[in-house]
Image (cartoon, rainbow, N blue to C red):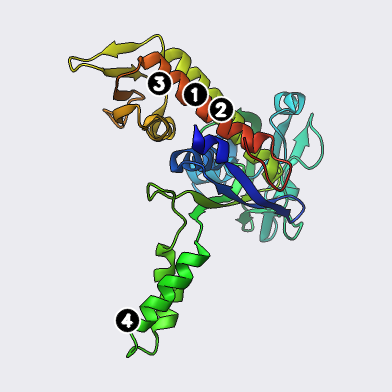
Amino acid sequence: MEEAKMAAIKSLKTTNDGRDLTAELIHFPVGFVNGLRRLILSGIPTVVIRDVQILENMTQMPHEMMKHRMEMLPVNVTPEESAVIKDAKIELRITTAKESKVITTDDFVIESGREGILMKDPEFGKPCMFLKIRPGESVHITARLAVENDGVSQVETATTGWHIDPDMAKDQRKKYIEDHKDDKDAARYFDNFLVQRCYSRDDKNRPNWFDLQIKSIGVLKAREILKMAVRILKKRVDEYIAAALKNIRHEKDEGTYSISLDIGGHTLGVLMQEVIYQDDVQFVSYDIPHPLKPEMVLRFNTKKTPEKILETAKKTIDEYCSVIENNDGDKSGV
């Protein structure tokens, strides 16, 4: 497809010892960019604290809150460190305190693991605050490590924004000021608000240029997180297409097909809908029938065979993924 051949990633820069990344994604579909963002935010394998056992708690903090706070501590272990994840035991034991004290991650003891498992503040290098105890209070907690893929995050933030077209912004700014000569704040108002409407578009008036920003918590480099998200997205698409090819159902209307599977969700649904919609397809939509069930239904109408449509979609998405995976740090395209 033409869009896939034009796709490119430009101005890729990493700062803050690789924790921060900025880049421009050009001629990618919105669904692909949004799918990457969703995976970067909460789809990257992350080592977390689990199996929390509160053996003693004489503090004012309820058990549920203490367990939640324990599970939220950042862990400086990569998913590949299987031995550390399996053997490490985390323990906090404070006997009856004689005076008020602020408990930090430096007060935790790590058994059968390496040093530095509990991450310190990446900006200042100081331990994270966990709890404040008063005289006479005591606490005893144990926990283990685990790897999770959903509902956890390797980043502080990951955002994508529509890139402002400088030529369009210049023309629209001039026009707006001329149309509002009596408003002395016209230029400032346009620069602060209306300029956001001047985003880059393709020939179908759809956004085609995006600003990507990733801020890692520090366990993995931001660039590594981006490539992991691409690999995960590609794998999910491969699994979906493989299952979809075996579950194509012919609808009553001629040339209309539907696929109902318990995989996909909004991340793949939006992407498949956008990639499939082209000159050879008269209609395409995806639907999540029930918000609490994993089922996703994809429907489309075409004069081609449904297998050809799905295989073309997979090939197109693979090309988009290759652009980012093979990026050399400045520019890449297929």
Q: Earlier in the sequence, mark 3 or mark 1?
A: 3
User: Circle 2 sits in a helix, a strand or a loop, which is it?
Assistant: helix
Q: Which residue position holds label 2?
A: 318
Q: Earlier in the sequence, mark 4 or mark 2?
A: 4
Q: Which residue is drawn at 51% across and 32% down?
A: 150
Which quadrant would residue 328 be assigned to in this image? top right
Separation of residues labelled 4 and 2 (CA atoms)? 47 Å
Separation of residues labelled 1 and 4 (CA atoms)? 48 Å
The disc label shown at residue 179, or none: 4
Viewer-closest of 100 and 117: 117
Place of residue 95 in the rendered image (x, y in percent of width and height, measured from the top left):
69, 46
User: Circle 1 sits in a helix, a strand or a loop, which is it?
Assistant: helix
**What's under tag 1, amino acid-wise?**
Lys
Q: Which residue position holds label 1?
A: 314
Q: Does residue 104 lie above or below 276 as drawn?
A: below
Give the quadrant of the C terminus. Answer: top right
Q: Does residue 18 lie above or below 268 as drawn?
A: below
**What's under tag 2, amino acid-wise?**
Asp
Q: Earlier in the sequence, mark 3 or mark 2?
A: 3
User: Circle 4 sits in a helix, a strand or a loop, which is it?
Assistant: helix
Place of residue 220 in the rendered image (x, y in percent of width and height, measured from the top left):
70, 41
User: Circle 3 sits in a helix, a strand or a loop, which is it?
Assistant: helix
Separation of residues labelled 3 and 2 (CA atoms)? 14 Å
Q: Which residue position holds label 3?
A: 309
User: Crowdedness of circle 2 by 10 Å Cα count: few (<14), some, many (20+)?
Assistant: some
